[in-house]
């Protein structure tokens, strides 16, 4: 798209930045819609942005913004809210949910390689628009319209060790959770993943091509990374039934740091493989770890709002693609941006090491 339409990388990166911003800013609206109108109406409200129609930067930016809005209304906010309410083995079902979602990341680059010879990038976006419409209608039909808060499901998971978690588990409110420093450590770690995800997926292919990889190889590396993420998601969900989610989050951040450092210096199959492995493992554990930490520390009562607030704050991750596009035009490469992402994740890794279960704040 950048080459055919004569754009610069600052404009391309701004599109990804707006996608992330729109996703974060509408997360609370998605939560409110679920509370007020139920899940089906929220899923059907997720719009489909036809990037295939793009002929100008303005239309491209509008389309990416609509994709961000659609993401917050149709994916993790609604999905985790429903699944963690109707299944008792929450960690397992959350892992399975994000595994199925990650398979889209596996298919995406491969679909592009399959359809681009017959219609270029426009055919790629059209194929996604049609698939998204069909899947959204099926999800709206299959999902329960409302799920009630069932105190019986609020028994703390096996890995919740300290007795004070069990005592406080049913009583957390949004206000109490927002007063807990632990909430912001969880949100910060999640934001680091989103920063790395949007930045790497926005520029990794171009970066690898500039460092000698063929377009087919670069796209395949992204598919392998997503496949690893899908496999790790389901494994992480199963392991999360017995292992504390903090451990999963620590492994996630270490893997992301290693993966982004490998991407920055990628030249040859070894470093590209390390990038795919590191970011894939980080992707696979990130959503499971953040979701289960929120549930384990604060319970289901305030989960929907807290998850939405986490997504809202993670809008800061949109700075990654904007900075990446600027860096490419200014200094001629993406390596420095990838290393900055790794450094930011290292800061959150240090904070997570000292993360402890919260004692309930009193109103």
Image (spheres, rainbow, N blue to C red):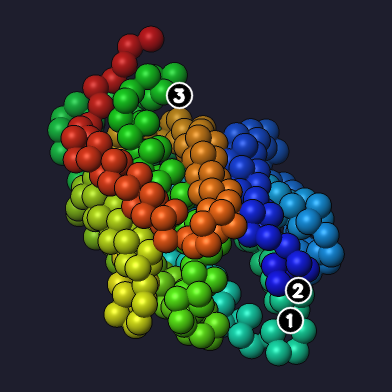
Binning the other alpha carbons within 10 Å of mark 3 as few (below 14), some (14 to 19) or many (20 upward) gives some
Picture coordinates of residue 119, whole percent (x, y): 77, 84
Point 41% across, 55% down: residue? 336
Mark 1 → mark 3, Cα distance in angstroms: 47 Å
Point out which mark residue 174 bears: 3
Counting every numbered tag in the picture gives 3
Point 42% across, 61% down: residue? 335
**Marks 1, 3: nearer the viewer:** 1
What residue is disc 1 on? 120
Point 46% across, 50% down: residue? 194
Picture coordinates of residue 24, whole percent (x, y): 58, 41
> Which residue ends up furthest to the front in the rendered image?
331
Picture coordinates of residue 2, whole percent (x, y): 69, 67
Closest to the observer, 245 or 123 = 123
Mark 3 → mark 2, Cα distance in angstroms: 48 Å
Callout 2 touching callout 1 (CB < 8 Å): yes
- Position of 82 compared to 89: left or right? right
Q: Is residue 120 visible?
A: yes
Q: Earlier in the sequence, mark 2 or mark 1?
A: 2
Residue 38, image quadrant? top right
What residue is disc 2 on? 4
Q: Is 144 placed above or below 279 here?
A: above
> Which residue ends up furthest to the top in the rendered image?
363
């Amino acid at each position: 798209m950048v080459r055919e339409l004569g754009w610069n990388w600052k404009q391309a990166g701004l599109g990804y930045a707006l996608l992330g911003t729109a996703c974060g800013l509408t997360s609370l609206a998605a939560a409110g819609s679920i509370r007020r109108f139920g899940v089906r109406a929220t899923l059907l409200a997720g719009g489909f942005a036809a990037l295939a129609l793009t002929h100008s930067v303005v239309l491209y930016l509008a389309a990416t913004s609509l994709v961000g809005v659609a993401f917050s209304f149709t994916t993790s906010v609604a999905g985790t809210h429903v699944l963690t309410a109707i299944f008792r083995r929450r960690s397992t079902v959350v892992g399975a949910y994000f595994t199925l979602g990650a398979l889209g990341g596996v298919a995406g680059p491969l679909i592009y390689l399959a359809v681009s010879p017959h219609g270029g990038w426009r055919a790629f976006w059209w194929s996604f628009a049609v698939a998204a419409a069909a899947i959204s209608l099926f999800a709206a039909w299959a999902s329960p319209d409302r799920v009630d808060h069932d105190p019986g499901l609020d028994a703390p998971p096996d890995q919740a060790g300290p007795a004070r978690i069990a005592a406080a588990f049913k009583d957390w409110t949004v206000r109490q959770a927002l007063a807990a420093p632990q909430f912001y450590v969880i949100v910060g770690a999640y934001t680091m993943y989103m920063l790395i995800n949007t930045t790497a997926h926005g520029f990794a292919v171009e970066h690898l091509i500039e460092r000698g990889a063929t377009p087919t190889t670069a796209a395949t590396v992204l598919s392998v990374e997503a496949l690893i993420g899908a496999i790790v998601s389901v494994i992480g969900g199963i392991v999360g039934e017995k292992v504390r989610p903090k451990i999963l989050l620590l492994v996630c951040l270490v893997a992301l740091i290693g993966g982004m450092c490998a991407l920055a210096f990628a030249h040859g199959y070894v470093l590209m493989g390390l990038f795919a492995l590191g970011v894939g493992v980080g992707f696979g554990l990130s959503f499971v770890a953040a979701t289960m930490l929120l549930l384990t520390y604060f319970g289901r009562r305030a989960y929907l709002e807290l998850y939405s607030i986490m997504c809202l704050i993670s809008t800061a991750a949109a700075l990654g693609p904007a900075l990446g596009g600027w860096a490419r035009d200014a200094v001629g490469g993406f390596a420095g941006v990838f290393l900055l992402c790794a450094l930011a994740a290292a800061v959150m890794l240090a904070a997570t090491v000292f993360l402890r279960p919260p004692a309930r704040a009193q109103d």
